[in-house]
Amino acid sequence: MSRLSPKISNKLEEYQVKIEIILLVAFVVGLLLKIFTGVGASILIVSLSSLAFFYWMLGNKHYPEDVKMMAVFLDRLTHTASSIAVVGILFGVVKWTGASTFLSVGFFALLAVTVVGLIYKLKVKEDLNFFHASSIRTLALLLFSGVLLFMGTGVI
């Protein structure tokens, strides 16, 4: 991988919350258009695929030397699992084949990384901050992908 990717990822991290909000608003608008008018799938595709790519890019950022390897591993796994879950949500909402595969992999990977992350934070006696943006994002993706996975894509 080129050295350009971590530089871009580190720059993107500065604007993470703003980019997520913009893409999530576009997702909600597309979803509402799809539900009430039948159009809006293109907005859903662009917003969710951009969000998936954004999460994947964040997993490739450069970490300072003093960050523990387990924390780096969990962060990269969280971003990769988030990306997969978002692709599963996209496939589920647009009703493409393969949605259950992406939703299963994304959901269970996020669930595993959440459990391992909690155990790791308890072990190193790190502050358990559930109101941190990454925790809220991970729990929201777990909830949404879990609903689509276990209740079916007919929910939306």
Image (cartoon, grey):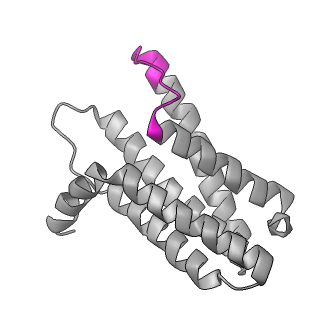
Front residue of 5/23: it is: 23
Front residue of 99/35: it is: 35
Give x and y (percent) for residue 37: 77, 82
Instruction: Establish if 113 lies above or below 34.
Output: above
Front residue of 134/25: it is: 25
Is 134 situated left or right of 40 in this image?
left
The verdict on residue 128 being magenta is yes
Q: Residue at x 24, y 33 (%)?
A: 67
Is 147 situated left or right of 102 in this image?
right
The image quadrant that residue 112 belongs to is: top right
Q: Which residues are magenta?
A: 121-133
Quadrant housing the N terminus: bottom left
The verdict on residue 127 being magenta is yes
Instruction: Establish if 93 lies above or below 121.
Output: below
Q: Residue at x 51, y 72 (%)?
A: 47
Instruction: Establish if 82 lies above or below 137.
Output: below
* Observer able to see residue 52: yes
Q: Residue at x 42, y 41 (%)?
A: 74
Quadrant housing the C terminus: bottom right
Is 122 situated left or right of 66 in this image?
right
Front residue of 41/98: it is: 41
Q: Residue at x 63, y 65 (%)?
A: 28
